[in-house]
Amino acid sequence: MTDALPGPDAQPSSASETPKPPRMGLELQEGVRIPRRQVFSWALWDWGTQPFNTVILTFVFTAGYLISASFLDPAVAALGEDDPAYQRGLAELTSGLGLWTTLAGILVAVLAPVLGQRADASGRRKAWLAGATAGMVLCMLALWFVEADPVYFVFGAIVIGLGSVLSEIAGVNYNAMMVSVATPRTVGKVSGLGWGLGYVGGILMLLLVVIANGADWWGMPTDNGLAYRVIAVACALWALAFVWPIFTFVPELPPTKGRPAVGFFASYGVLFRDIKGLWHTARRTFWFLLASAVFRDGLSGVFAFGAIIGSVSFGFSSDQVIIFGIAANLVAGVSTILIGRLDDRFGPRSVILATLSVIVVAGLAVVFLRDLGPIVYWVGGLVLSACVGPAQAASRSYLARVTPAGKESEIFGLYATTGRATSWMSHGLWTILIAATGATIWGTLGIIAVVLVGLVLMWFVQDAPVADAGTPARPTDAAPDATPDPTGVA
């Protein structure tokens, strides 16, 4: 096998000849010794940016503030929590937030693979990562201006949606850079370390929020949502403090050879040809992108709306949601780091199938046993947290194992796109079920349904290659007379 990649339109020379699969990027890392400083510097980006997901999107700013009575019409807010109009008002806020995050997902679907492709061609993944990370930080700073008044709700939802877009674009290049700090024997552990440190970073930020709240914010006024606005600024400063090592110590992947510079819109033609190339030469990657698109959207729904379910459906106060968030992130961080080692031993597919199965069972229990009270949310939510992180880390590990060399950002861009292209599923079903029933709890069934469909699809995808006995296996390894199967379907 040569290092040269076949062109995106590569075809067999005869009807009976199978096209040769391209060399995987991780194969080029075979036998390479990766300094620990590089691995840790890469993982710190997750640590630094995770508070945007944990504190802003999930447990504090949205669940405790943006979908609270502060943004209801004052006449409706005055009716009290037991009034149906009050509950409908909160449901409208949650569905409204879902609408803006759905629109953000569409924007990611349109931009992510093309921007990733251009980053591959130019070899400037760090520059794209830096720009998107800076934009995400600016969005967190902009949340300072979201005052506690219904007129600011749309502004807040738009800023959060834009921050989500920039977070995804940054994540494309961050994930692509994992190939430069991992080998076929360590990619599962490295991916799990990044996710795990991210959860720990989220825990520490949540703890700071709890401490500040317990100290009554040291005499600082908290009216007009000031406490939540300060939290958003603190998350921005946290990110700035910890993301810099990846730009200093992690090496840049070289630009993809043979990629001429093309205009932005012409990049979509190149993207289409590259997708055709995946079908012919790396079909396992193609099938995984499709299957993971579904279950990852369900996983994003768990995190996007999990705290909202606790707040609205189980009556958790803001402090209770934060305490739950700390416990959930602790469980998720530990399980993700530990299960990352199982990924390297048993393969990422096994980890994904096992964790998705548990998520479906736990999610159904939260819905149908809700009358038992908050204990159901605590147990079910922590079980979900213990599985979502490992499923996400194993998904990233799987794709790194089957990504052709030189196309890391583009493939991870497709990874973001396929996930966001189906984001209408969990967010849309969430919105529709809540609008139809008038109760937030039933939106959970929409999320679990998406996870279940993704679980079924994943059963039909082959596992990625896993290193064995110190010698990394290759996806093209076969008996001398065997013809590699390009279908990628078990």
Image: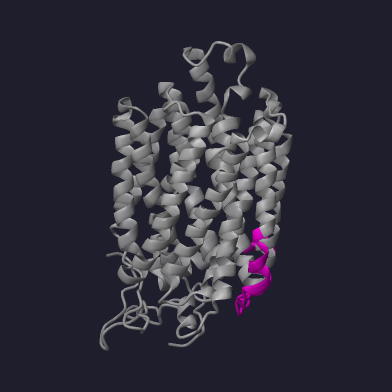
Name the residue located 35 percent from the left edge and 74 percent from the top edge.
Answer: 466
Q: Position of residue 183 (x, y in %)?
A: 46, 77
351 relative to 325 in the view: left or right:
left
Residue 119 pos. (x, y %):
64, 67
For the magenta stretch, what is the residue range? 242-269
Residue 459 coordinates in the image, percent (x, y):
28, 57
Q: Quick check: is 262 in the magenta stretch?
A: yes
Q: Is residue 428 above or below residue 236?
A: above
Quadrant where the C terminus sits is: bottom left
Q: Quadrant of the N terminus?
A: bottom left
Residue 211 visible in this rendered orientation of the protein: yes
Compare residues 156 and 431 and report the one nearer the observer: 156
**Residue 429's quadrant in the figure?**
top left
Q: Nearer the viewer, residue 375 or 269?
A: 375
Here the colouring is one colour
Q: How many marks?
A: 0
Q: Is residue 327 left or right of residue 471?
A: right
Q: Quick check: can you spot residue 424?
A: no
Residue appearing at x 33%, y 34% in the figure: 376
Residue 428 vertical position relative to residue 164 in the rendered view, above or below = above
| Residue 436 picture quarter | top left
Q: Residue at x 29, y 81 (%)?
A: 483
Q: Which residue is drawn at the image coordinates 58% and 49% (left, top)? A: 51
Q: Main secondary structure of the magenta part?
A: loop
Q: Position of residue 249 (x, y in %)?
A: 64, 74
Residue 158, magenta (yes or no): no
